[in-house]
Amino acid sequence: MQVRSVVLPHTGSAIDLKLFFPGAGVVRQHGVVSQTMGDQFRATFTDCDEFSRQRLYALLHGREVGSQRSQRFHTDLKVIVREPGRATTAALVSNLSRTGAFVRLERLPARGRVVELELAFPGEAVHESVNAFVVHVAPGRGIGVQFIGATGAFTSRLDEYLTQLSR
C-alpha cells in the first residue's frame, strides 16, 4: 500500500494503519515500511490473513469501479466546516449521499485535506459531526467530500434524512 505522509517513517519501521471505507467501516492493519520516496512511503501488511486480504481487495476494487456509489439527493442543509488551522465556516450542503456531499462555500480547503463537518439535520437540536476527505474542489462553488470514520449515530441519522428526501 502506498501512503502520503507529512512525516515519513523510517524504512523497516512497524506501523499501524486505519483504512476508512464509507459504508464498510474501518479496517485496521499492522505493517512495515518497505520504501520511502518524496512525501510518500510504501507499507507491507504483516498480519493480513487470506480473509482480510480478500476483504481489502473487495473494498478497494469496489471503490475503483464505482460499484458502491450511493444515490445522491439535492438538499439545502446547513453545515459548519472545520479545518485545522483555519477559522470555522458556515456553509450549505447542496448534494448529499450516504457516502459524501457537495458543500457550497467560498474559502475552499485543498483537495486531499480532511475537514470536520457538523450537519444540522432538520428538527434536531443536536448536530451530527463527521470527518470528510476533500475529493473535489470546484473554484467559486465548493468542495466534494467523502465521509470517513462515520459513527453509528451519524450514519443512522443520515439514513433517516436520506429516506425523507427520497419520498
Image (cartoon, rainbow, N blue to C red):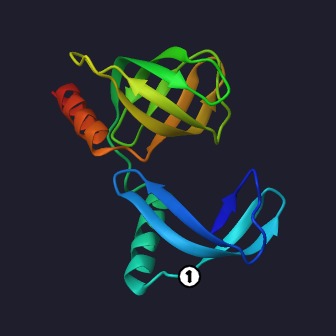
Label 1 neighbourhood size at 10 Å, few (<14), some (14-19), many (20+)? few
Q: Position of residue 50 (x, y in %)?
A: 41, 86
Q: Residue at x 56, y 67 (%)?
A: 16
State whether residue 102 is above or below residue 4.
above
Q: Residue at x 71, y 74 (%)?
A: 13
11 relative position to 47: left or right: right
Q: Position of residue 11 (x, y in %)?
A: 77, 74
Q: Residue at x 38, y 44 (%)?
A: 150
Q: Position of residue 28 (x, y in %)?
A: 46, 66
Q: Residue at x 24, y 32 (%)?
A: 162
Q: Residue 94 falls in which quadrant of the image?
A: top left
Mark 1, residue position: 46
Identify the image quadrant of the C terminus: top left
Identify the image quadrant of the N terminus: bottom right
Q: Residue 98 falls in which quadrant of the image?
A: top left
Q: Looking at the image, how many numbered discs can be counted on the residues?
A: 1
Q: Position of residue 49 (x, y in %)?
A: 43, 85
Considering every residue shown, the one lying at the far bottom of the view is: 50
132 relative position to 126: left or right: right
Residue type at the position of mark 1: Thr
Considering every residue shown, the one lying at the far front of the view is: 14
Secondary structure under badge 1? loop
Q: Residue 139 falls in which quadrant of the image?
A: top right
Considering every residue shown, the one lying at the far right of the view is: 38
Question: Which sits in the foreground, 131 or 77?
Answer: 131
